[in-house]
């Protein structure tokens, strides 16, 4: 069968050819009897919907091609249109087939959590009873099994209930004192304050406005206008020379060089790990979708075998 995109293009070609034939010949082409040797040549865009499919096969339609004597500017489009009609006619009604399978599953009791006669509140209450085990914080059914028994509905409810049970488990562990907590004392970074510039905050070299970053104070950066203005106002040339000397002594020490190098390495490593994690997630989702597709095929095959 044609894909939706190709089917749209094909139907557009048939429509244009149908109009051109009607304009040139004054109406649709007469379709010859199936037994006539000119039957396939008489098929064109103007009568392709009227072609009886009984007795036709995909192999028969190969004779419809450019130069076969038929009308129209694109004989391949006519052949493709007929092939698509024939393929779709051989398929059972999709909606009807799904409903038949669903009805069979209901008869077998496989959709016992579908509960079509209950309202939303009553249905969720019944689902909660079926999923929650008072003796455990884990749900009785995994998400996929739950959706199979509901007929596909209730995914958001399962997710919400799973989070609720996980929170309850954490609360109980916290009550027993078993929930791990860090005992490390934390102090906020004491950044430079123009009104308290005499305070030594211990940040080197000469302050570190980012807290954990390799940034130094720089002229032209709005973040450092206050400290730069203060330095220009208070310091003499001799003091600037001494300032630069001290800066070099600190910034060029092996320890500081290694620290700056390590911070840069950690930023690059963090980006690499993020990309790797996202790539892995995409691969897992693709594999999951393929696995689910195969499982659906296997389930459909088993249902078909049961029907037979």
Image (spheres, grey):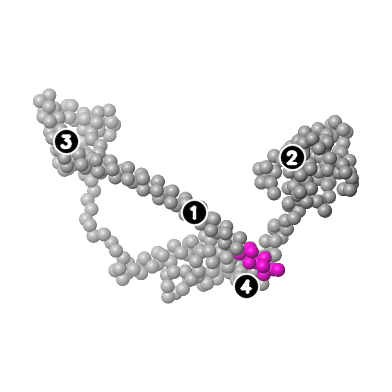
Asked if labels 3 and 2 touch by Cβ distance under 8 angstroms, the answer is: no
Q: Which residue is mark 2?
A: 77
Q: CA distance from mark 2 to mark 1?
A: 38 Å
Binning the other alpha carbons within 10 Å of mark 2 as few (below 14), some (14 to 19) or many (20 upward) gives: many
Per the image, label 1 sits on a secondary structure element best described as helix
Q: Say which residue appears at 73% left-offset and 43% top-offset.
A: 80
Q: CA distance from mark 4 to mark 3?
A: 76 Å
Split into 4 quadrants, where in the image is the C terminus?
bottom right
Q: CA distance from mark 2 to mark 3?
A: 75 Å
Q: Say which residue appears at 40% left-offset and 48% top-offset.
A: 276
User: Compared to 129, does 286 lie above or below?
Assistant: above
Image depth: mark 4 or mark 3 in front:
3
Is residue 288 rendered magenta in the image? Answer: no
Q: Which residue is mark 4?
A: 109
Q: Which residue is mark 1?
A: 285
Where residue 285 appears, as percent x and y from the top left, is 49, 54
Image depth: mark 4 or mark 1 in front:
1
User: Compared to 213, does 108 lie above or below?
Assistant: below
Q: CA distance from mark 3 to mark 1?
A: 48 Å
Per the image, label 3 sits on a secondary structure element best described as loop
Per the image, label 2 sits on a secondary structure element best described as helix
Dividing the picture into quadrants, the one containing residue 219 is top left
Q: CA distance from mark 2 to mark 4?
A: 48 Å
Image depth: mark 2 or mark 1 in front:
2
Range of residues picked out in magenta? 299-308
Where residue 169 appears, as percent x and y from the top left, is 38, 68
Most distant residue in the top direction:
237
Q: Say which residue appears at 21% left-offset and 42% top-offset.
A: 259
Q: Which residue is mark 3?
A: 252
Q: Point out the tag, 2 or 3, that comes first from the N-terminus.
A: 2
């Amino acid at each position: 069968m044609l894909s939706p995109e190709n089917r749209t293009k094909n139907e557009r070609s048939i429509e244009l050819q149908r109009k051109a034939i009607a304009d040139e010949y004054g109406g649709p082409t007469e379709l010859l009897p199936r037994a006539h040797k000119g039957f396939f040549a008489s098929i064109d865009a103007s009568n392709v919907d009227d072609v009886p499919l009984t007795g036709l096969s995909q192999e028969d339609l190969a004779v419809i091609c450019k130069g076969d004597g038929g009308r129209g500017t694109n004989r391949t489009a006519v052949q493709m249109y007929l092939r698509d009609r024939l393929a779709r006619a051989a398929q059972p009604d999709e909606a009807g087939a799904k409903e038949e399978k669903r009805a069979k599953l209901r008869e077998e009791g496989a959709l016992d959590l579908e509960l079509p006669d209950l309202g939303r509140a009553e249905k969720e209450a019944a689902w909660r009873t079926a999923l929650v085990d008072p003796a455990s914080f884990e749900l009785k059914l995994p998400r996929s099994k739950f959706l199979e028994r509901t007929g596909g509905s209730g995914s958001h409810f399962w997710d919400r209930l799973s989070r609720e049970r996980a929170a309850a488990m954490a609360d109980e562990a916290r009550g027993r004192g078993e929930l791990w907590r860090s005992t490390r004392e934390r102090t906020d970074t004491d950044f430079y304050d123009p009104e308290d510039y005499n305070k030594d905050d211990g940040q080197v070299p000469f302050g570190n406005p980012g807290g954990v970053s390799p940034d130094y104070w720089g002229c032209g950066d709005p973040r450092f206008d206050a400290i730069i203005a203060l330095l220009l106002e208070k310091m003499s040339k001799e003091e600037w020379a001494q300032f630069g000397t001290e800066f070099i002594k600190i910034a060029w020490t092996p320890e500081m060089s290694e620290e700056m190098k390590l911070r840069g390495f950690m930023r690059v490593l963090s980006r690499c790990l993020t990309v790797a994690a996202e790539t892995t997630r995409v691969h897992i989702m693709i594999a999951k979708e393929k696995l689910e597709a195969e499982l659906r095929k296997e389930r459909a095959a088993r249902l078909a075998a049961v029907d037979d």
